[in-house]
Image (tube, helix red, strand yellow):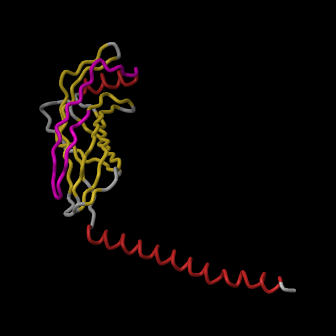
Amino acid sequence: MPSGPTQTATPARRRPILRCIAITILALIVLIGLLVLIIWLTVKPKKLVYTIEDGSVHGFNLADKTLNATFDLTLRADNPNTRIAIYYDSIEVSVWYEDQIITISDVRPFFQPRRNATRLEVKAVAQSTPVLQTVYNDLRHDKSKGEVQLEVRMKARIRFKMAKVKSRHYTLKAYCYPVVHFNPSKPFERTFCDVDI
């Protein structure tokens, strides 16, 4: 029959084409992997380091399950990379106590060069902030002891810059705990932050 050889020949012709496509895809994956490895070895990226260098509380007042307070914080953003600079396009700093947000503050965007440490002065104001009953009770108790354990969180939209190339936006999150301070006679202890990008 004339149709028999045509039907058996078609799959045989497809095999070299499929093999060629598979080899091409594999070669592309290997090339991309090598390119990423070369860039990584060239750049040698280092982790960004964030710390709370200083912190104080002013005008602390608890009444009728509301909080008034001003939190003055000094954050230090350390970029140890020799080839990567960072654009901070938006920065938000929030102060938490237990599981409740106490106050939130925006920080001015900035550009951080390579091998640079930048100090950010943050004034976060809680004005008649309603608090849960348990938070109210615990804050009163901690205030009477002279110490309060706060958590400071930073959320930023950042872009990396290497030579003239800028990356897409990434979300950086830093969690700093415990930030303990209430007694002005006691020296502030630096707090290191966990960083997630």
Q: Is residue 141 above or below residue 108?
A: above
Give residue 25's position: percent from left, percent from top.
51, 74
Q: Is residue 67 magenta?
A: no
Q: Residue furthest left?
A: 185
Q: Is residue 107 above or below residue 136?
A: below
Q: Residue furthest front?
A: 2
Residue at 22% across, 22% down: 60
Front in this rendered view, residue 190 or 120: 120
| Residue 127 quadrant | top left
Give residue 58's position: percent from left, percent from top.
18, 25
Residue at 40% across, 23% down: 134
In screen coordinates, is 86 left or right of 197?
left
Residue at 29% across, 37% down: 92
| Residue 114 quadrant | bottom left
Q: Is residue 71 above or below residue 137?
A: below
Give residue 128's position: percent from left, percent from top.
29, 17
Q: Residue furthest top?
A: 64
Front in this rendered view, residue 57 or 47: 47
Residue at 29% across, 34% down: 149
| Residue 123 quadrant | top left
Instruction: Name the quarter where the N terminus is drawn.
Output: bottom right
Front in this rendered view, residue 146 or 77: 77
Q: Is residue 173 above or below residue 144?
A: below
Counting the numbered discs, the total is 0
Give residue 24's position: percent from left, percent from top.
51, 78
Residue range of the region highlighted in magenta in the rendering: 106-133
Name the dominant secondary structure of the magenta segment.
strand
Q: Is residue 131 magenta?
A: yes
